[in-house]
């Protein structure tokens, strides 16, 4: 099809149609095309073409498209969209220009794309179990808040209780005039409780039968099967990180940096990476620092950070503990050793990869 044996392609994926720009080795634009975002269209386009280095932005279709093109023998780079200022800051932005920009970046230096790694189909399917459970939990919280708000507006106050016991305990406190509106809500909440428990049993079975390494991570007090399995399925391959301390930045648990000369302001956390796993780790950190958290060096270290500065210091301490927790979980995953919560003083202020973990 082309004279060159090595080409560089940029692929701007759309929901219905995608744009392709292809460069030769000299950087000359030799083809532009628009094709449907379907497996058949991509097969027709790239099956007979010479080997290409193909760049695309991460998105809804990037997982299956990248896997398909890799199976067809092409080198595929999935770019981190948040790092591509050349695209989202372009004053003349359109799909054709985006595809050409991706191709030129792939030709110049793949590192400029900050390429990401898609999970395997099995890991993605198992992670969907966790995300489906999370969707049900958020739906339950929305319905509970709705019921409480509507009852309060009518002069009633529903009792304080856990989410699992809300449907049974709230029913007698609902005003009679609101029964037609709120009793079906309580029935839905009760049904969601059963479905969430089914997901919990499925997650425990996955940890026991398919991902036994999750049980190693769950040694840490405050980390349950849900967080342990989410950590493993999100990162998937622990060897992606040369050092355990690289996990914190990958999950957005480090501050932004905007240093220039003598100016080095304190900024908020980057919040890059997987938001779901980051939220789970922060929840674990809140438990560790909370009134029911077990006494351990990680808790004591976090409480020392929270001693000075009021609410702001407490929030920073929670994020700091979440970051240390991510590092610790990665280290346990790599070594497979037994976790001892009490370690020699000073270790946590350095680098948790050096933890003395003995059986």
Image (cartoon, rainbow, N blue to C red):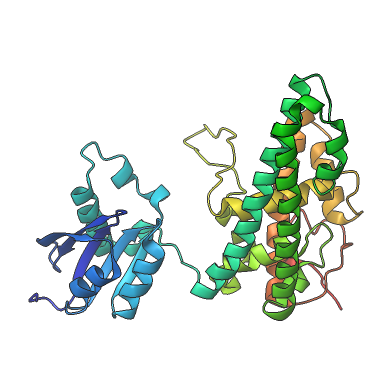
Viewport quadrant of the C terminus: bottom right
Position of 279 with respect to 30 (left or right) is right
- Residue 254 point in image, percent of width and height: 61, 47
Quadrant hosting residue 318? top right
Q: Using the image, determine if residue 175 lies above or below residue 276.
A: above
Q: Visible in this render: residue 24?
A: yes
Name which residue lies at 54% across and 42% down.
Answer: 256
Front-most of residues 259 and 292: 292
Viewport quadrant of the N terminus: bottom left
Name which residue lies at 62% across and 49% down.
Answer: 253
Name which residue lies at 75% across and 70% down.
Answer: 204
Quadrant hosting residue 225? bottom right
- Residue 55 point in image, percent of width and height: 30, 63
Q: Using the image, determine if residue 163 lies above or below residue 59.
A: above
Position of 315 with respect to 97 (left or right) is right
Position of 118 with respect to 311 (left or right) is left
Front-most of residues 195 and 357: 195
């Amino acid at each position: 099809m082309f004279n060159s044996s090595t080409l560089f392609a940029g692929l701007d994926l759309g929901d219905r149609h995608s744009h392709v720009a292809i460069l030769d080795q000299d950087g000359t634009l030799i083809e532009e095309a628009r094709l449907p975002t379907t497996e058949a269209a991509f097969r027709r386009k790239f099956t007979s073409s010479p080997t290409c280095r193909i760049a695309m932005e991460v998105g809804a279709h990037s997982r299956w498209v990248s896997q398909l093109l890799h199976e067809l023998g092409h080198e595929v780079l999935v770019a981190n969209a948040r790092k591509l200022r050349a695209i989202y800051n372009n004053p003349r932005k359109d799909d054709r220009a985006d595809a050409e920009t991706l191709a030129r970046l792939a030709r110049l230096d793949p590192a400029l794309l900050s390429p990401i790694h898609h999970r395997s189909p099995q890991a993605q399917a198992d992670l969907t179990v966790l995300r489906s459970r999370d969707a049900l939990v958020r739906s339950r919280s929305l319905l509970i808040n709705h019921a409480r708000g509507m009852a309060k507006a009518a002069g009633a106050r529903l009792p304080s209780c856990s989410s699992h016991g809300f449907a049974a305990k709230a029913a007698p406190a609902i005003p009679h005039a609101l029964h037609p509106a709120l009793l079906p809500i309580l029935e839905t909440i009760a049904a969601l409780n059963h479905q969430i428990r089914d997901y919990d049993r499925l997650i425990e079975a996955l940890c026991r039968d398919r991902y036994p390494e999750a049980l190693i991570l769950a040694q840490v007090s405050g980390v349950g099967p849900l967080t342990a399995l989410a950590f493993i399925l999100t990162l998937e391959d622990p060897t992606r990180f040369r050092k355990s301390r690289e996990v914190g930045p990958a999950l957005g648990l480090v501050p932004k940096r905007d240093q220039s000369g003598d100016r080095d302001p304190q900024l908020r956390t980057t919040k890059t990476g997987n938001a779901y796993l980051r939220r789970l780790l922060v929840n674990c950190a809140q438990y560790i620092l909370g009134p029911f958290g077990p006494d351990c060096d990680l808790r004591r270290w976090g409480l020392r950070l929270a001693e000075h500065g009021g609410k702001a210091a407490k929030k920073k301490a929670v994020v700091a503990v979440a970051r240390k927790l991510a590092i610790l979980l990665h280290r346990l995953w790599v070594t497979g050793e037994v976790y001892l919560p009490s370690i020699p003083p000073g270790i946590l202020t350095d680098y948790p990869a050096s933890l003395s973990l003995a059986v």
